[in-house]
Amino acid sequence: MAASDVLRSRELLAIIAAHQSGLPEAVADIPRLTSAVRLAGYTDIKYLTNIPLRFASLPYLQRYRDPATMLLARALILATSRNSQNVDPALPLHLLVVEGNVATVALWLRCKPGFVTSRTLELAAVASQGAVLRFLYDRYPALATPTVMDLVAKAGDATLLRWLHAAGASCTKAAMDGAAMNGHLDAVVFLHEARTEGCTKIAATAAVRNGHADIVRFLLEHRTEGIDPYLRHSIPYINYHTHSVIGTTHVGAVDAAMARSLLASEAVQLVTKEALGFAELQHFYSRGYCTMAKSLLEWAVTRHDNAMLAYVLDGICTEHAQPKSDDEWLPPLGDWKNSRAIDLAAFYGNVAALELLHASRLQCASARAMAFASYNGHLHVLQWLHAHRRDGCSEDALALAAARGHLHVVRWLLEVYQVPMTQAALATAAYVGDLAIVTYLSKLPYTDGRENVRSGGLCRSFLPKNGGALDRGGGDYVNGPAAKWAARNGHFDVLQVLLAAGHTL
């Protein structure tokens, strides 16, 4: 063979290139794409920043919050250390696994075979990349852990599950538990019929809670593990977001469980609140599955469903004999202390709900009702509470109204209800830069005895919703010198008013 023929041989060129350092063109850009990825976090919970959009946009990573900027490192099943900020060198391989192209994974491993571990196979399972998992399993069978098959079952890939079974893979009870929890009936049936590991009580318990009636019926008919009566269960492999089916048959699931009297009243209430509504509550209550409870009462108020609220109140009165006195009362059984249904109704501005609750004479209000109404600017609620209730008004009501810019409420509280003028109210108005409220309040003397407070900070009121929105620090209002807050936040028009009124920095 002539020398020129040898030099032009494609076969020889491929052999030479295979033994040279470097990466094939198809994966040559991967190191560049991943070079900017950094590991953040100083606890056991680590985050990956700067994930390239090519990978962050993949369906599996989209199941996690902020996949491009703050991706949980455990989503890629990478090795991390509490005291190290070094990125696992397996990152490029694991991103390619999630992408799901067997050819590029094979090319990468041909050049960098040292980074494949059991975690790599587990990632292929959790990301539902069946073709990649088969390739890795065939090439590295010793790296297959029971977790691999467990995760395939939890992800619901029945075809891959059968393939792993035929290949001799092992699993644990968590396989059927996860499949049942995520709504994968085919996987549950296969594991029951073909395997001996079985499941735990988690399987049927999670299936009820997640609304998978067909799975509940199958498990109760064919297995004996049962259901936790309060629907308490752990979540197998909770850190990994596998594919799951959204359950839509909660009523059927509860019916199947209650046909065997397996659920406590609290469990039925829980399912109703988590996933259902008024019609389903009527269905369950009419069949005696549950009693009325404080949580249902407050849930009805939160849903702004006055028909449901009336139904719950009627049920409470039916279950418990009311005293003949006009005094407020509480049912003798159950956790009824500290009920705050009226407080919630005031927060949401629902006078119709207030009237229903007030007429029931249930003891379910506190001085927080006026504060909650003040926060949301519900003057009509404040007027109703003033006319019909005697629960008082908590000290932070004025500051909460100021925080949200409700001048009409601020004036009503001071002029009609005659709450004390507080330093916190003026400080909060100055903090948010509300010139109108500051102008009004700066003319009034403090009556809370704190004129000389020289320090201050963010304060919380533990609101039912949207609390801690005043600042990144999580406050609902502030206290301390008003002029200081105005200056700090750059509200110089407010500062001028305060200085003119005699306030100092």
Image (cartoon, grey):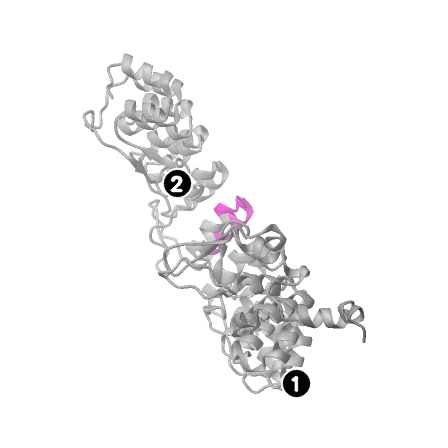
Q: Nearer the viewer, mark 2 or mark 1?
A: 1
Residue stretch in magenta: 301-316
In this rendering, is residue 107 above or below 397? Answer: below
The secondary element bearing badge 1 is classed as: helix
Which mark is drawn over residue 332?
none
Measured as percent of width and height from the top left, residue 466 is found at 44, 41
CB atoms of marks 2 and 1 within 8 Å: no
The secondary element bearing badge 2 is classed as: loop
In this rendering, is residue 50 above or below 395? Answer: below
In the picture, which quadrant includes the C terminus? Answer: top left
Q: Amino acid at mark 2?
A: Gly
Q: CA distance from mark 2 to mark 1?
A: 55 Å
Measured as percent of width and height from the top left, residue 218 is found at 62, 78
Q: Amino acid at mark 1?
A: Ala
Picture quadrant where residue 287 is located: bottom right
Please name the residue that numbered disc 2 is placed on.
468
In the image, 302: left or right of 447? right
Q: Residue at x 33, y 53 (%)?
A: 337
